[in-house]
Image: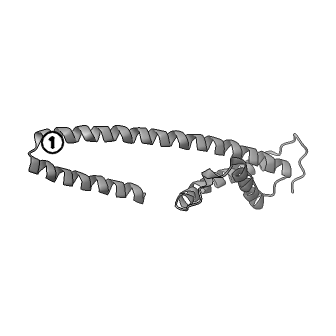
Amino acid sequence: MHNLKPGSVNKTTVMKLFVMLGLLFLSMGVSAQEESRTPKKVHSLPVDSVASNRANNVEKVIDITLEQKEEVKDVYEQFLTTQRRVHVRHKKLIERANRKLEKAREKMDEKMEEILTDEQYKEFKEYSDKRQERGRQRFDDE
């Protein structure tokens, strides 16, 4: 463990900490993709619990003091709180965009129905539905 006095800062140690935090944030992106495929969602766990766990993981990788560990935990709590707010806003924006697209699609269908014969419109709907399904599959695969 490092012997830092409260209030004293070793620039090299701070830089190492930031580099490791950067690597951990990067790895969180990869692990978040994996976690999103599992039933257990990290974002449903309490922020302080996740932050403590991540601070413990940092401690396993870097030799840090208890004071540094608490500061790392605080940084994670701030990050996770912001991340969750952003995810909620993002989800609402996507839902709103999907509603707008659905209304636009309904208007397009109405206009196509006016332009095409009954038989042509039926073929168009089949074609359109298939295209829409392929688009959903591509989105789900990503």
For image coordinates 15% across by 51% down, the residue present is: 122
Which one is nearer the viewer's eye here, 115 or 76?
115
Q: Write the residue at 29% across / 52% down.
A: 132
- 89 vs 119, left or right, is right
* Quadrant location, the C terminus: bottom left
- The residue furthest front is 118
- Residue 125: where, in percent of width, then height? 20, 50
Residue 142 drawn above or below residue 85? below
Instruction: Please state the horizontal and vertical placement of residue 39, each as a whole percent of the image.
Output: 56, 61
Point out the image quarter for the N terminus.
bottom right
Q: Amino acid at mark 1?
A: Glu
The kind of secondary structure element at disc 1 is: helix
The image shows residue 96 at horizontal and vertical percentages of: 42, 38
Picture quarter containing residue 87? Answer: top right
Horizontal arrangement in the rendering, residue 40 relative to residue 66 (left or right)? left
Give how far across and how far down residue 79 sits, in percent: 66, 44
Quarter of the image holding residue 109? top left
Q: Looking at the image, which is closer to me, 135 or 110?
A: 110
Q: Which residue is mark 1?
A: 113
